[in-house]
Image (spheres, rainbow, N blue to C red):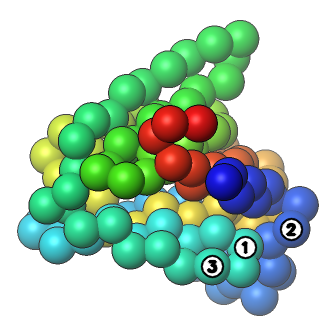
């Protein structure tokens, strides 16, 4: 069972000050994953593995928990993986389409997939 959400389905009621696709904290207890229509909470106690992948100018970060894999795709995602190394990522979400082109120096999450590890 795979759920895929891309930026074209995102809502446009986000505020202009909230352009970042992830937020860090000192000691979060879980990773909050916000897709277009859902919010998933993954406790860091079940975190197993993260992998950064760069192919053809696109970045991906694969985050594995005990019973789910969160695949994040976009641009400039290496700092996200670095923050995961410290278990410091509190939230990840899609960048609203209306903000494309803004904050070009920031990492951009264009797609989030949540799937079972055996798929």
Image side of residue 16 versus residue 88, left or right: right
* Residue with the mark numbered 3: 38
Residue 81 in sight from this viewpoint: yes
Pick the front one: 23 or 114: 114
What's the residue at 55%, 42% (across, down)? 71
Identify the disc placed on residue 9.
Answer: 2
Marks 3 and 2 sit apart, C-alpha to C-alpha, by 12 Å
114 in relation to 15, above or below: above
List the single residue furthest toward the top. Answer: 56
Which residue, as the protein is rendered here, is positioned at the far front? 118
Q: Secondary structure at mark 1?
A: loop
Examine the rendering and report whether any part of residue 77 can be seen. Answer: no
Q: Quadrant of the C terminus?
A: top right
Residue at the spot of label 1: 36
Which residue is pictured at 56% across the width and 72% down the height? 34
Q: Residue at x 75, y 67 (%)?
A: 96
| Residue 21 sits in quarter | bottom right
């Amino acid at each position: 069972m795979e759920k895929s959400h891309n930026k074209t389905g995102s809502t446009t009621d986000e505020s202009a000050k909230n352009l970042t696709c992830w937020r860090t904290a000192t000691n979060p207890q879980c990773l909050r994953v916000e897709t277009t229509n859902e919010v998933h909470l993954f406790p860091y106690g079940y975190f197993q593995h993260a992998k950064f992948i760069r192919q053809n100018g696109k970045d991906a970060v694969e985050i594995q928990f005990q019973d789910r894999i969160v695949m994040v795709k976009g641009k400039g995602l290496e700092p996200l993986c670095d923050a995961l190394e410290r278990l410091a990522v509190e939230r990840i979400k899609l960048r609203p389409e209306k903000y494309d082109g803004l904050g070009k120096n920031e990492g951009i999450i264009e797609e989030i997939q949540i799937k079972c590890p055996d798929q």
